[in-house]
Image (spheres, rainbow, N blue to C red):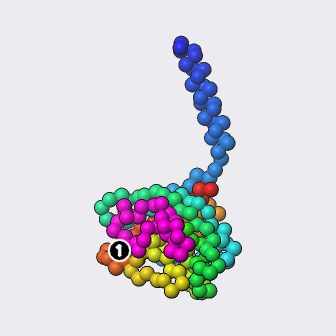
Amino acid sequence: MNAAGTVVVLAILALGGCAMDRGEQQRAPQACQLPEERYSPPLSLDSLQLQNLAGHYALTVAETSGYPGDSTIYGHLWLSPTEPDRRGPRERPYPLAGWSDVDLESLAPVSLAYPASQRDPGSPGVQMEYDTRDLNLILVFGAASVGTQFYEDAGVIFRVFAVDSMGFRGRWVDGGARAPLPRGYFCADRAD
């Protein structure tokens, strides 16, 4: 192929790439950063707003407590409405549950009672809890509370600091009894 033919082929490829970019107009995920606040602010959410958080998310989890290993990992989170008989008490309902493929154990020695990838509705890998008294929204990875089942010193607690139409973000801490507690921050950006 001569030089003119190569230029034509490259121009066609470049134009095709531009057309694909225009056809895939989606909001780019925000850079995942450590929240400025140290404690989760109250989030006044009604049941419809909580149900609207159901979906598929791209998950970024960063560790900041200094354990050796990966400092940032990536995966996915799937949340769906919890079955009515598994929604928990009125003052601290569990509106959503699901699972995640993120490997939290590659970040630090976390205290999971079972894998966050577990898809059992009776013991979901991830459970969302909303405390209607102090207006805190959390996700518990690997230690859901269902019925009379409760895990002490287990699970990884993701405290939500901000929610918008594209996802949510906040800080996480291990629920175990080890010192220092593994901790960090996370971002969940809608992937569907």
- Left or right: where 110 falls relative to 24: left
Q: Front-most of 128 and 168?
A: 128
What x and y, as percent, mark residue 14? 59, 30
| Residue 16 figure quarter | top right
Q: Tally the numbered discs.
A: 1
- Left or right: where 24 falls relative to 68: right
In magenta, the rendered stretch is: 99-126
- For the question of whether residue 160 can be seen, the reply is no
Provide the secondary structure element on which disc 1 rests. Answer: loop
- Residue type at the position of mark 1: Leu
- For the question of whether residue 121 can be seen, the reply is yes
Specify few, some or many for label 1: CA neighbours under 10 Å numbering under 14, 14-19, or 20 or more.
some
Can you identify the residue that label 1 sits on?
A: 181
What x and y, as percent, mark residue 149? 48, 83
Above or below 8: residue 102: below
Q: Which residue is drawn at 46% across and 75% down?
A: 143
- Left or right: where 94 falls relative to 117: right
Secondary structure predominantly adopted by residues drawn in magenta: loop
The magenta stretch spans residue 121: yes
Above or below 180: residue 152: below
| Residue 30 figure quarter | bottom right
Above or below 188: residue 138: below
What x and y, as percent, mark residue 43? 60, 76
Q: Front-most of 190 and 125?
A: 125
| Residue 131 figure quarter | bottom right
Q: Residue at x 64, y 50 (%)?
A: 26
Q: Which residue is drawn at 41% across and 82% down?
A: 152
**Quadrant of image for the C terminus:** bottom right
The magenta stretch spans residue 123: yes
Residue furthest to the right: 48
What x and y, as percent, mark residue 3? 53, 15
